[in-house]
Image (cartoon, rainbow, N blue to C red):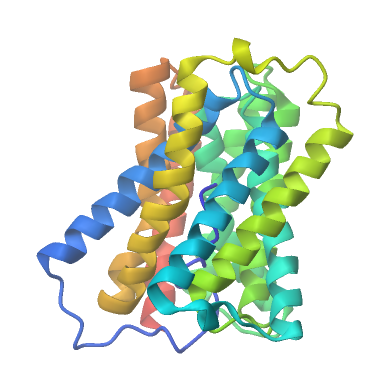
Amino acid sequence: MHTTKPVAGTTGKSSSAASPAKRVTGAVWVALTIVYVVWGSTYLAIRVVVETLPPFLSAGARFVTAGLLLTALVAWRQGPAALKVTRAQLGSALLVGLLLILGGNGLVVLAETSIPSGLAALLVAAVPMWVVLLRAGGGDRPSPRTLGGVLVGLAGLAVLTSSGLSGSVALWGVGLVLAASVLWSLGSFSSGRLPMPKNPFTASAYEMIVGGVGAVAVGLLRGEQRGLDLAEVSTGSWVALGYLVVFGSLVAFTAYAWLLQSAPLSLTATYAYVNPVVAVILGALILDEALTWPIVAGGAIVVLAVGVIVSTERKG
């Protein structure tokens, strides 16, 4: 996964509703392309990182660095006062950060040591489905069409999971990504109901820092530091890690936050089903990841289901 971002169209908030006054300008398309390509490419970058770097330590380094850079950027652009939060807001940001960064992203990074990046992205695409189910459990009543999209998406996940049951990929890796998507969904769902910092950049900075520290702690507990020789880390892994910090966690998030303010949310929300398609294409082209029938068929079903959910939610 990428950085701390809400699931557009599924958080249950009404404050971000699309405004008819928002126009689709050239700047909107530039920002949207950044979100499409960069967030779609993060799965590929993660796969390259874990070739020679340990999963949790590398994920922790990524988010602590990105969080500190974002903190400095907020203080520089908006003044130190923009970083002030109440104790309740800080506690909420820390909890959401652990769910999103440590749980959601950390498990994906670990899983990508054993499964293709494209498959991981398609499994993560189920996040809007889990959020809908969490909303239903919390008392909301999603429309029949939304629930239908969830059922179709679950069928797609079953097809994707069959690649693990058949032995073509590691089943434990598939299970980890599914668990990660549930934790990410829980974090996204909770962020709409907890007293979060009003400034989304401040909230994201705190979430990334605490999530990153948590990932480092887990990595140390797993003993990932043993035998780690930084001199043996490939140039590709270092470049990919830097790409994740700068582009995945800063540039794309900034573009996404701007889109939430400047573009119709129905258009911004399309990242949810474009990202996995980009990830699959990049994984196949650059890493020669196999496009087996469960991945192609299951992925198509999941992307279609997410498209139905997102489009229906935006009409509601």
Q: Residue at x 45, y 73 (%)?
A: 9
Figure quadrant of the C terminus: bottom left
Toward the left, the furthest residue is 26
Q: Residue at x 50, y 41 (%)?
A: 122
184, 131: nearer the viewer:
184
Q: As displayed, is residue 37 above or below residue 241?
A: below
Q: Is residue 311 left or right of residue 84?
A: left
Q: Position of residue 40 (x, y in %)?
A: 40, 42
Q: Is residue 165 visible?
A: yes
Q: Position of residue 186 (x, y in %)?
A: 69, 65
Q: Residue at x 63, y 46 (%)?
A: 105
Q: Is residue 174 left or right of residue 126?
A: right
Q: Position of residue 86 (x, y in %)?
A: 70, 86
Q: As displayed, is residue 150 above or below residue 114?
A: below
Q: Is residue 181 left or right of residue 17?
A: right
Q: Residue at x 52, y 77 (%)?
A: 80
Q: Is residue 135 left or right of residue 91?
A: left
Q: As displayed, is residue 158 above or below residue 283?
A: below
277, 242: nearer the viewer:
242
Q: As displayed, is residue 142 above or below residue 123?
A: below
Instruction: Report the number of discs.
Output: 0
Quadrant of the image occupied by residue 18:
bottom left
Q: Is residue 151 visible?
A: no
